[in-house]
Image (cartoon, rainbow, N blue to C red):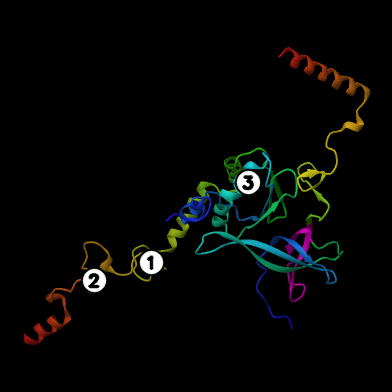
Amino acid sequence: MSVPRGAIHAKWIVGKVIGTKMQKTAKVRVTRLVLDPYLLKFFNKRKTYFAHDPLQQCVVGDIVLLKALPERRSKHVKHELAEIVFKVGNVIDPITGKPCAGTRFLENLSDSENLTEADTTYLSEKLQELKVCSRDK
Amino acid sequence: MPMKGRFPVRRTLQYLSQGDVVFKSSVKVMTVNYNTAGELSEGARKFVFFNIPQIQYKNPWVQIMLFRNMTPSPFLRFYLDNGEQVLVDVENKTNKEITEHIKKILGKSKEMLEKEERERKKLSHPATFGPKKYHLRECMCEIEGQVPCPAVVPLPKEMRGKYKAAMKNEA
């Protein structure tokens, strides 16, 4: 006996996973900026959504992108996991594609281990040139 | 008596309505990743401080999320309705450049905004009277050059129903 309910409003949402204790379901907290009518300042307003996660690959603290299902899966579950944007503890910087933590990269960005003989001689020559310039000054 | 805060002009309706970035209807989520320290994120920080309120005011149905100090490089990410994601690198850009860029790639053009404005104007008729929510004016007495409201200035004797009825009875 399913009561016909209106279409799901939020088609795509981004939120943080706060609970994974349910089987194949993730509890996701979504924050939106709402204008306070007197202060005229935007504050975060939270709302929790339940998302279907068939492979149970979410951990508490992940940032996930949810997609609205065409029809409700159950009374509360109206969305499914589209992709994990940032995995907790394993954030990949989308611009460089390298793993990072906070404001530093985890691996060395410069390719210093794979330099050949020719590369090292070329670089040392360049460094010599720089030393000459500084002495002239 | 000045307003509280660092740049309280951000909290005025005039400033909020001055934002000119109106997203296309396919943009659903906007995510801003920036850092609280460092020269590279300076433009992104100013963007979040000054321009995000304007954008959210003009696009109340777009979800905006801010992430601080998660990655070394600052960027913006838009999630569109068809599943597409747009990544915008904002390293070493000023906040003005960032707003111009997103207005160019995902904002409604000026012609579209004007067209929508005209469509909205067509719905309401300016020559009708009624509640302020639906009409421009409530009564004819508000217009200059018309008979003023009898609540403020009493009507001359000839216009009052009492006098007119008395005259008719007399005749």
Nearer-the-camera pick, B136 or B30: B30
Mark 1 touching mark 2, by CB under 8 A? Answer: no
The residue lying at 12 percent from left, 76 percent from top is B157
Give the residue pinned by disc 3.
Answer: B45
Residue A53 lies in the magenta-colored region: no
Query: SS class of the residue under badge 3?
Result: helix
Q: Residue B7 location in percent, x, y?
A: 52, 50
* Residue A132, position as x, y percentages in the image: 78, 14
Q: Residues within 10 Å of mark 1 (few under 14, many from 20)?
A: some
Q: Which dot marks residue B169? A: none
Q: Where does the magenta region start and end?
A: A61-83
Vertical relation: A116 (above or below) B166? above
Q: Does label 3 lie on the same chain as label 2?
A: yes
Q: Chain of mark 2?
A: B
**Which of the marked residues, 1 or 2, is nearer the chain's N terminus?**
1
The amino acid sitting under disc 1 is His
**Sequence-wise first label, 2 or 3:** 3
Estimate the spatial distance between the alpha carbons at disc 1 and disc 3, rounded to whole Å.
Answer: 42 Å
Left or right of residue A76, residue B110 in this image: left
Q: Is residue B17 left or right of residue A78?
A: left
Which three-letter amino acid code belongs to the residue tagged 2?
Cys
Tell me the number on the disc at residue B149: 2
Question: Closer to us: mark 1 or mark 3?
Answer: 3
Check if mark 1 and mark 3 are on a common chain: yes
Q: Chain of mark 1?
A: B
> In this picture, is A107 found above or below A114?
below
Task: Name the residue carrying label 1.
Answer: B135
Q: Position of residue A27 (x, y in %)?
A: 77, 68
